[in-house]
Image (cartoon, rainbow, N blue to C red):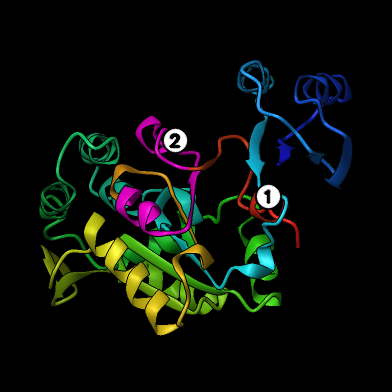
Protein backbone atom coordinates (compact mmCIF):
# COMPACT_ATOMS: atom_id res chain seq x y z
CA UNK A 1 0.00 0.00 0.00
CA UNK A 2 0.99 3.61 -0.51
CA UNK A 3 0.33 6.16 2.21
CA UNK A 4 -0.60 9.58 0.85
CA UNK A 5 0.11 12.49 3.20
CA UNK A 6 -1.07 15.96 2.22
CA UNK A 7 -2.26 19.15 3.82
CA UNK A 8 -1.93 22.92 3.92
CA UNK A 9 1.54 22.21 5.30
CA UNK A 10 3.48 18.99 5.90
CA UNK A 11 6.52 19.72 8.12
CA UNK A 12 9.58 17.56 7.27
CA UNK A 13 9.84 16.33 10.86
CA UNK A 14 6.23 15.11 10.74
CA UNK A 15 6.82 13.38 7.43
CA UNK A 16 9.90 11.62 8.83
CA UNK A 17 7.97 10.51 11.91
CA UNK A 18 5.03 9.15 9.92
CA UNK A 19 7.42 7.39 7.56
CA UNK A 20 9.04 5.61 10.49
CA UNK A 21 5.70 4.59 11.99
CA UNK A 22 4.54 3.31 8.60
CA UNK A 23 7.81 1.45 7.94
CA UNK A 24 7.85 3.08 4.50
CA UNK A 25 10.49 2.09 1.97
CA UNK A 26 10.68 5.57 0.45
CA UNK A 27 9.05 8.98 0.11
CA UNK A 28 8.03 10.62 -3.16
CA UNK A 29 6.95 14.27 -3.31
CA UNK A 30 3.82 14.72 -5.40
CA UNK A 31 3.17 18.44 -4.95
CA UNK A 32 4.28 21.25 -2.65
CA UNK A 33 2.55 19.73 0.37
CA UNK A 34 1.74 16.20 -0.82
CA UNK A 35 3.80 13.04 -0.46
CA UNK A 36 3.55 9.35 -1.28
CA UNK A 37 5.07 6.95 1.25
CA UNK A 38 5.75 3.70 -0.53
CA UNK A 39 5.17 0.19 0.88
CA UNK A 40 3.53 1.69 3.96
CA UNK A 41 1.96 -0.28 6.77
CA UNK A 42 -0.96 0.91 8.83
CA UNK A 43 -0.17 1.74 12.43
CA UNK A 44 -2.51 2.93 15.16
CA UNK A 45 -0.26 5.91 15.80
CA UNK A 46 -0.62 7.34 12.29
CA UNK A 47 -4.20 8.75 12.45
CA UNK A 48 -3.64 10.74 15.67
CA UNK A 49 -0.31 12.06 14.35
CA UNK A 50 -2.00 13.34 11.21
CA UNK A 51 -5.00 14.72 13.07
CA UNK A 52 -2.79 16.64 15.50
CA UNK A 53 -0.84 18.14 12.59
CA UNK A 54 -4.02 18.85 10.57
CA UNK A 55 -2.94 16.85 7.55
CA UNK A 56 -4.89 14.27 5.56
CA UNK A 57 -3.77 10.68 5.14
CA UNK A 58 -4.95 7.82 2.96
CA UNK A 59 -3.76 4.26 2.43
CA UNK A 60 -4.16 3.60 -1.29
CA UNK A 61 -3.42 0.44 -3.29
CA UNK A 62 -0.26 0.89 -5.33
CA UNK A 63 -2.07 -0.25 -8.48
CA UNK A 64 -4.78 2.44 -8.24
CA UNK A 65 -4.45 5.02 -11.00
CA UNK A 66 -6.58 8.11 -11.56
CA UNK A 67 -6.63 7.35 -15.29
CA UNK A 68 -8.38 4.07 -14.46
CA UNK A 69 -11.55 5.90 -13.41
CA UNK A 70 -14.25 7.02 -15.81
CA UNK A 71 -16.65 9.12 -13.74
CA UNK A 72 -16.41 11.50 -10.78
CA UNK A 73 -19.71 12.37 -9.07
CA UNK A 74 -19.84 15.44 -6.83
CA UNK A 75 -22.24 17.02 -4.42
CA UNK A 76 -22.58 20.78 -4.88
CA UNK A 77 -23.24 22.66 -1.62
CA UNK A 78 -20.24 22.63 0.74
CA UNK A 79 -18.43 20.30 -1.66
CA UNK A 80 -17.88 21.74 -5.14
CA UNK A 81 -18.79 25.16 -3.74
CA UNK A 82 -18.17 26.63 -0.30
CA UNK A 83 -21.72 27.69 0.57
CA UNK A 84 -25.11 26.13 1.20
CA UNK A 85 -27.14 27.98 -1.44
CA UNK A 86 -30.47 27.70 0.35
CA UNK A 87 -29.00 29.26 3.50
CA UNK A 88 -27.71 32.22 1.50
CA UNK A 89 -31.06 32.61 -0.27
CA UNK A 90 -32.73 32.65 3.15
CA UNK A 91 -30.33 35.39 4.23
CA UNK A 92 -31.99 37.64 1.67
CA UNK A 93 -35.12 37.37 3.84
CA UNK A 94 -33.24 37.70 7.11
CA UNK A 95 -34.01 34.11 8.13
CA UNK A 96 -30.64 32.45 7.52
CA UNK A 97 -30.18 31.17 11.12
CA UNK A 98 -33.57 29.46 11.09
CA UNK A 99 -33.00 27.80 7.72
CA UNK A 100 -29.33 26.98 8.37
CA UNK A 101 -30.27 25.11 11.55
CA UNK A 102 -32.55 22.82 9.53
CA UNK A 103 -29.85 22.39 6.87
CA UNK A 104 -27.30 21.35 9.47
CA UNK A 105 -29.68 18.84 11.05
CA UNK A 106 -30.39 17.33 7.64
CA UNK A 107 -26.68 17.10 6.77
CA UNK A 108 -26.03 15.33 10.08
CA UNK A 109 -28.76 12.86 9.21
CA UNK A 110 -31.02 13.89 12.08
CA UNK A 111 -34.07 14.67 9.93
CA UNK A 112 -35.34 13.43 6.57
CA UNK A 113 -33.79 15.42 3.73
CA UNK A 114 -36.89 15.69 1.54
CA UNK A 115 -39.03 16.92 4.42
CA UNK A 116 -36.32 19.35 5.50
CA UNK A 117 -36.06 20.76 1.97
CA UNK A 118 -39.81 21.31 1.72
CA UNK A 119 -39.79 23.06 5.10
CA UNK A 120 -36.90 25.31 4.13
CA UNK A 121 -38.21 26.16 0.67
CA UNK A 122 -41.64 27.00 2.10
CA UNK A 123 -39.98 29.74 4.16
CA UNK A 124 -38.75 31.36 0.94
CA UNK A 125 -42.25 31.98 -0.42
CA UNK A 126 -42.62 35.44 -1.93
CA UNK A 127 -38.90 36.09 -2.41
CA UNK A 128 -38.03 37.81 -5.68
CA UNK A 129 -36.17 35.48 -8.06
CA UNK A 130 -33.44 38.11 -8.44
CA UNK A 131 -32.20 36.92 -5.03
CA UNK A 132 -30.97 33.74 -6.73
CA UNK A 133 -28.79 35.77 -9.07
CA UNK A 134 -27.40 37.74 -6.15
CA UNK A 135 -26.43 34.56 -4.34
CA UNK A 136 -24.74 33.18 -7.46
CA UNK A 137 -22.90 36.39 -8.33
CA UNK A 138 -22.05 37.67 -4.85
CA UNK A 139 -21.68 34.65 -2.59
CA UNK A 140 -21.07 31.46 -4.52
CA UNK A 141 -17.41 30.48 -4.53
CA UNK A 142 -15.76 27.30 -5.73
CA UNK A 143 -14.05 25.16 -3.13
CA UNK A 144 -10.25 25.39 -3.10
CA UNK A 145 -8.68 23.25 -5.78
CA UNK A 146 -11.96 22.65 -7.65
CA UNK A 147 -10.82 24.03 -11.00
CA UNK A 148 -7.44 22.27 -10.76
CA UNK A 149 -9.20 18.97 -10.09
CA UNK A 150 -11.71 19.43 -12.91
CA UNK A 151 -9.00 20.38 -15.38
CA UNK A 152 -7.06 17.22 -14.56
CA UNK A 153 -10.15 15.04 -14.87
CA UNK A 154 -10.93 16.51 -18.28
CA UNK A 155 -7.37 15.94 -19.48
CA UNK A 156 -7.74 12.26 -18.59
CA UNK A 157 -11.14 11.97 -20.27
CA UNK A 158 -12.94 11.36 -16.97
CA UNK A 159 -16.60 12.45 -17.04
CA UNK A 160 -18.16 14.59 -14.30
CA UNK A 161 -21.61 14.54 -12.72
CA UNK A 162 -22.75 17.29 -10.35
CA UNK A 163 -25.76 15.95 -8.44
CA UNK A 164 -27.36 18.07 -5.76
CA UNK A 165 -30.26 18.35 -3.37
CA UNK A 166 -29.96 22.05 -4.23
CA UNK A 167 -31.34 23.86 -7.22
CA UNK A 168 -31.08 23.87 -11.01
CA UNK A 169 -30.58 27.65 -10.98
CA UNK A 170 -27.07 27.01 -9.64
CA UNK A 171 -26.18 23.62 -11.14
CA UNK A 172 -27.10 24.80 -14.66
CA UNK A 173 -24.80 27.80 -14.36
CA UNK A 174 -21.97 25.75 -12.90
CA UNK A 175 -22.32 23.20 -15.71
CA UNK A 176 -21.71 25.92 -18.29
CA UNK A 177 -19.04 27.72 -16.30
CA UNK A 178 -17.01 24.60 -15.48
CA UNK A 179 -17.84 22.52 -18.58
CA UNK A 180 -19.31 19.70 -16.51
CA UNK A 181 -20.69 16.71 -18.38
CA UNK A 182 -23.88 16.05 -16.38
CA UNK A 183 -25.90 17.82 -13.69
CA UNK A 184 -29.03 16.94 -11.71
CA UNK A 185 -30.83 18.90 -8.98
CA UNK A 186 -34.17 20.28 -7.83
CA UNK A 187 -36.27 22.95 -9.49
CA UNK A 188 -37.74 25.85 -7.52
CA UNK A 189 -41.22 26.91 -8.60
CA UNK A 190 -41.28 30.55 -9.69
CA UNK A 191 -44.41 32.48 -10.66
CA UNK A 192 -44.55 36.11 -11.70
CA UNK A 193 -40.92 36.53 -10.71
CA UNK A 194 -41.45 35.25 -7.17
CA UNK A 195 -40.59 31.99 -5.42
CA UNK A 196 -43.78 30.14 -4.50
CA UNK A 197 -42.20 28.17 -1.67
CA UNK A 198 -42.52 24.88 -3.56
CA UNK A 199 -40.20 22.46 -5.34
CA UNK A 200 -41.33 21.05 -8.68
CA UNK A 201 -41.26 17.34 -9.40
CA UNK A 202 -39.63 14.56 -7.41
CA UNK A 203 -37.06 15.79 -4.93
CA UNK A 204 -33.51 14.58 -5.44
CA UNK A 205 -32.72 13.19 -2.01
CA UNK A 206 -30.16 10.63 -0.86
CA UNK A 207 -31.68 7.85 -2.98
CA UNK A 208 -32.09 10.22 -5.90
CA UNK A 209 -28.37 11.02 -5.84
CA UNK A 210 -27.48 7.33 -5.82
CA UNK A 211 -29.92 6.70 -8.66
CA UNK A 212 -28.36 9.44 -10.78
CA UNK A 213 -24.89 8.02 -10.20
CA UNK A 214 -26.11 4.60 -11.29
CA UNK A 215 -27.91 6.03 -14.34
CA UNK A 216 -24.84 7.84 -15.63
CA UNK A 217 -22.54 4.94 -14.77
CA UNK A 218 -24.62 2.59 -16.89
CA UNK A 219 -24.91 5.16 -19.66
CA UNK A 220 -21.12 5.37 -19.79
CA UNK A 221 -20.80 1.56 -19.53
CA UNK A 222 -18.56 1.75 -16.47
CA UNK A 223 -18.02 -0.66 -13.61
CA UNK A 224 -18.66 0.55 -10.05
CA UNK A 225 -14.91 0.39 -9.44
CA UNK A 226 -14.45 3.11 -12.08
CA UNK A 227 -16.59 5.64 -10.21
CA UNK A 228 -15.49 8.15 -7.56
CA UNK A 229 -18.08 10.03 -5.49
CA UNK A 230 -17.38 13.08 -3.32
CA UNK A 231 -19.76 14.50 -0.71
CA UNK A 232 -20.09 16.00 2.74
CA UNK A 233 -23.54 15.34 4.21
CA UNK A 234 -25.73 12.46 5.32
CA UNK A 235 -27.79 12.76 2.14
CA UNK A 236 -24.61 11.84 0.20
CA UNK A 237 -24.12 8.51 1.96
CA UNK A 238 -26.09 6.36 -0.49
CA UNK A 239 -24.32 8.00 -3.41
CA UNK A 240 -20.92 7.46 -1.78
CA UNK A 241 -21.76 3.81 -1.10
CA UNK A 242 -22.83 3.31 -4.71
CA UNK A 243 -19.42 4.39 -6.01
CA UNK A 244 -16.35 2.20 -6.07
CA UNK A 245 -14.46 4.95 -4.24
CA UNK A 246 -16.11 7.33 -1.76
CA UNK A 247 -14.46 10.53 -0.52
CA UNK A 248 -15.74 12.62 2.38
CA UNK A 249 -14.92 16.28 1.74
CA UNK A 250 -14.78 18.47 4.88
CA UNK A 251 -17.66 16.27 5.90
CA UNK A 252 -19.91 15.59 8.85
CA UNK A 253 -18.66 12.83 11.21
CA UNK A 254 -21.32 10.36 10.03
CA UNK A 255 -19.92 10.67 6.50
CA UNK A 256 -16.24 10.45 7.46
CA UNK A 257 -16.97 7.24 9.37
CA UNK A 258 -18.47 5.51 6.34
CA UNK A 259 -16.14 6.48 3.50
CA UNK A 260 -12.82 5.07 2.36
CA UNK A 261 -11.06 8.42 2.20
CA UNK A 262 -11.52 11.82 3.77
CA UNK A 263 -10.19 15.26 2.86
CA UNK A 264 -10.53 17.22 6.08
CA UNK A 265 -7.86 19.87 5.50
CA UNK A 266 -7.00 19.79 1.78
CA UNK A 267 -8.83 21.21 -1.21
CA UNK A 268 -10.48 19.18 -3.95
CA UNK A 269 -7.23 19.01 -5.90
CA UNK A 270 -6.11 16.48 -3.27
CA UNK A 271 -7.89 13.94 -5.46
CA UNK A 272 -5.11 14.30 -8.03
CA UNK A 273 -2.50 13.23 -5.50
CA UNK A 274 -4.51 10.37 -4.06
CA UNK A 275 -3.99 8.06 -7.01
CA UNK A 276 -1.07 7.66 -9.37
CA UNK A 277 -1.65 9.35 -12.72
Q: Is residue 166 visible?
A: no
Alpha carbons under labels 2 and 1: distance apart: 16 Å
- Rendering coords of residue 121 (x, y %): 16, 55
Q: Is residue 51 visible?
A: yes
Give the image quarter of residue 36.
top right
Q: Residue at x 16, y 73 (%)?
A: 190
- Please, is residue 9 above or below residue 149 in the view? above
Q: Which residues are magenta?
A: 236-259
Q: Residues within 10 Å of mark 2 (few under 14, many from 20)?
A: many
Q: Residues within 10 Å of mark 1 (few under 14, many from 20)?
A: many
- Rendering coords of residue 255 (x, y %): 39, 38
- Rendering coords of residue 188 (x, y %): 20, 68
SS at circle 2: helix
Q: Residue at x 28, y 36 (%)?
A: 104
Give the image quarter of residue 15.
top right
- Rendering coords of residue 105 (x, y %): 23, 34
* Chain-order first, disc 2 or disc 1: 2
Horizontal placement of 212 versus 227: left or right? left
Q: Residue at x 45, y 71 (%)?
A: 161
Horizontal placement of 8 versus 233: left or right? right
Q: Is residue 247 magenta?
A: yes
Q: Quadrant of the C terminus?
A: bottom right
Give the label on residue 274, or none: 1
Q: Residue at x 43, y 59 (%)?
A: 243
Give the label on residue 256, or none: 2
Amino acid sequence: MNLIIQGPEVPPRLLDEISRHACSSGVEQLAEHAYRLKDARFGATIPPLCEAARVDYAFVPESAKLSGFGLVVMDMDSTLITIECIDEIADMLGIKPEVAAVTEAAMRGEIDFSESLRRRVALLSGLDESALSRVYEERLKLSPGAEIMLSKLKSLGIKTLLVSGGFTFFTDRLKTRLDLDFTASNTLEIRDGKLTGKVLGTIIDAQGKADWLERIRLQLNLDRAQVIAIGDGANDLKMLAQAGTGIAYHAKPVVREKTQYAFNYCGLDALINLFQN
